[in-house]
Amino acid sequence: MKIVWFGLLFFAAVGAALVLAGQLGLLRGRTPHDLGVRNNRLKPPSRSPNSVSSQADLYADHPQKGYASIAPLQFTGDADQAMARLAEILKNSDQTVVVSQAPDYIYAQSTTQVFKFTDDIEFWLDRSANVVQVRSASRLGRKDFNVNRLRIETIRAQFAKN
């Protein structure tokens, strides 16, 4: 019985330490310095299953191509207005801050509520394809438990009804 109590106490202490570390900002990770659009491409998906990208198919031999693949955002009408709508959706999203915004590119960061993990989100207006290419990636951890996909799909649903 002492082993069970010790185990419970140990896991409670580890959980409390993780929450404290998150609240102190120790789980944010470092801001990537290679984000943005280069040669009409956003950064490739992560090499572990913790990101999604609408351009994953451009990297044929990428080990996470299947996991990371997600559709770009579709829009009709004026492209600049579509990007403005997208920026407003992001600005009104909980735990999300728009870091930089240009006419054809938006970079935002989303932070989880308890542990304060930070994910990087990019949107690029691909005028030639008339879509908004997307990428969302966790900075830390090997898995994202589908958080990035759910985030983009939530944004997509909001974007589609505007």
Image (cartoon, helix red, strand yellow):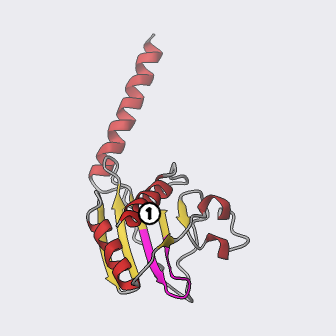
Give the side of residue 76 with respect to residue 101, left or right: right
Q: Residue at x 32, y 49 (%)?
A: 21
From the top left corner, tell me how far across and down residue 100 is, in percent.
32, 79
Residue 32 visible in the shown view: no
Q: Is residue 50 above or below residue 5?
A: below
Furthest-right residue in this view: 61
Magenta range = 121-134
| Residue underneath mark 1 | 156
Q: In what quadrant of the picture does the N terminus appear?
A: top left
Q: Is residue 39 above or below residue 52?
A: below
Is residue 131 shown in magenta? Answer: yes
From the top left corner, tell me how far across and down residue 57 is, in percent.
66, 71
Asked where in the image residue 110 lies, by quadrant, the reply is bottom left
Crowd rating for badge 1 (residues with CA inside 10 Å; few <14, some 14–19, many 20+) = some
Furthest-top residue in this view: 1
Q: Residue at x 39, y 36 (%)?
A: 14
Residue 18 visible in the shown view: yes
Q: How many marks?
A: 1
Question: How would you classify the magenta stretch by its main secondary structure?
Answer: strand
Is residue 159 shown in magenta? Answer: no
Q: In what quadrant of the picture does the C terminus appear?
A: bottom left
Q: Residue at x 34, y 41 (%)?
A: 17
Give the side of residue 52 with respect to residue 97, left or right: right
Looking at the rendered structure, the kind of residue marked 1 is Arg
